[in-house]
Image: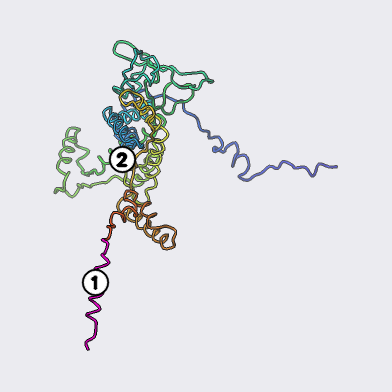
Amino acid sequence: MTNSSKHQLVERLDFMAGGGKMGVSDPLPKQQVQPKAHRTRTMEEIDSLVRDNSIVENIVTIPSEDMTRAGFEIITEDEATKSKIEEKLNALDFNGALQLALMYKRKYGDGFISIGVTQTVDFELSDPMNPNQVKSVDYIHPFSPKLLSTIELNEDVFDINYGEPSLYKIKGKSKTADVDPSRVMRFSQGREENEIYGRSVLEPMFDIVKVFDIALWSTGQILFDYTFKVMKTKDAETLTREEMQEARLLMDFMFRTEALAILSPEEDIQRHTANVGGISELLNFMWEALSGAAKMPKNVILGQQQGTITGGQYDILNYFNRVEADQENILKPYIMDFIKLLCQSSEINKPDFEFDIEFNSLWSLDDNEQADVDLKNAQTDQIYMQWGVLMDSDVREKRFPDLPPLEEEEEEDTTPEEEEDPEEDMTTIEESEEEEEPEE
């Protein structure tokens, strides 16, 4: 049996051969993504970046403001205890402390709130805080990682608190204090396994921020030299450096406005404009890259969005949905634990207080969009009522929950009718019959 049926190597002479696609001379398969050496930015570098660039400052501060600006509502049937808790939270400026701690988290990777309490027994800051021994919560102070000497982590993988702080060493004026984690709220992001500190939101987008800064500077230079003048004269070659400089200053001063120029036939003055074609596409690309890295729409970064959404602004809606998810996943556990601590203290003294919290809405539709939604809802309710799917009371309860039910309103409007005297009725009937009796 011959080997003629086996595949034979064929030398190709077209572009599929060695010098063409995927060959030794093809540069495409040789390209590889080279990972950059990660560089941790110091807090001083981050401070300088935020101070010098207002857009970067917005990226750091606006999300933390959005997470806390609308506040939250305590849901409970015990209105008296709720009023005491809200009064205490306002006295402590709890909302402001949360906002500042969240800002530190975005800026440096970590934000903290210290909880100052008075206890019924003597204690050290390194002792765990027993909520049953708390007499009062006196103060809360947000602070940044700048005040930390170090954080000791729990490295026991079989412990329930694995990876969590076991002790904070906080700097003081004269010495470093050991503080138990139960006395500190910590907000952290971007922290990987066995890492002590979190990562600033600005670190992975540092190159994009650099490009944005360059684009801002370059655009300013283009605008500064957007128009310039050119003068042609035969005497240019004979002028000295000093005379050239004097002529340039004089013409620059004289021809900044629409002035009259008197020239000889051999001289000429022209105004030239810089060509900015294509710069809009470049700036749009820069904004898209910056928005994607910050996970914030352009209008939000610019501070133009205040919670009112018009039709088609799905990027704004997605941003607020992301903020609302962070409220539920990040903020709510801390708020619940802190309110429980207040309830167990001697100030409130309601350890069995049952409650929940709901965050107030961050956004609303503009008037035109809301009117359109209300109209469609009214048309839908009308169809359901015509087909017997819903009753009047169902629509009233669904669309206007603050109004009293129809049954109560009808009872209030109904007054008892006066009972009629039957003798008066009979007298009225007899009189009527006498009047109708025909004359003889």
Neighbour class for label 2 at 10 Å: few (<14), some, many (≥20)? some
Q: Say whether disc 1 or disc 2 marks the residue closer to the N-terminus.
A: 2
Q: What residue is at 27 percent from the left and 62 percent from the top?
A: 419
Q: Is residue 420 magenta?
A: yes
Amino acid on which the number 2 mark rests in the picture: Leu
Percent x, y of residue 301: 33, 39
Q: What segment carries the magenta color?
A: 418-440
- Residue 434 showing in the rendered view: yes
Q: Is residue 241 above or below residue 408?
A: above
Q: Residue furthest top?
A: 174
Q: Is residue 202 visible?
A: no
Q: Which residue is mark 2?
A: 302
- In the rendered image, the quadrant that contains the C terminus is bottom left
Residue placed at 72% from the left, 41% from the top? Answer: 9
Q: In the structure shown, which secondary structural element does the residue marked by tag 1 occupy? A: helix
Looking at the rendering, in which quadrant would you find the N terminus? top right
Q: Which residue occupies the foreground of this view, 322 or 218?
A: 322
User: On screen, 415 above or below 182?
Assistant: below
Instruction: In this rendered view, identify the residue nearer to me: 197 or 290.
Output: 197
Residue beneath the point at 18% across and 50% down: 265
Q: Quadrant of residue 382?
A: bottom left
Q: Give 229 or 71, whichever is nearer the viewer.
A: 71
Residue highlighted by disc 1:
427
Q: Is residue 410 magenta?
A: no
Q: Looking at numbered disc 1 in the image, what kind of residue is underneath it? A: Thr
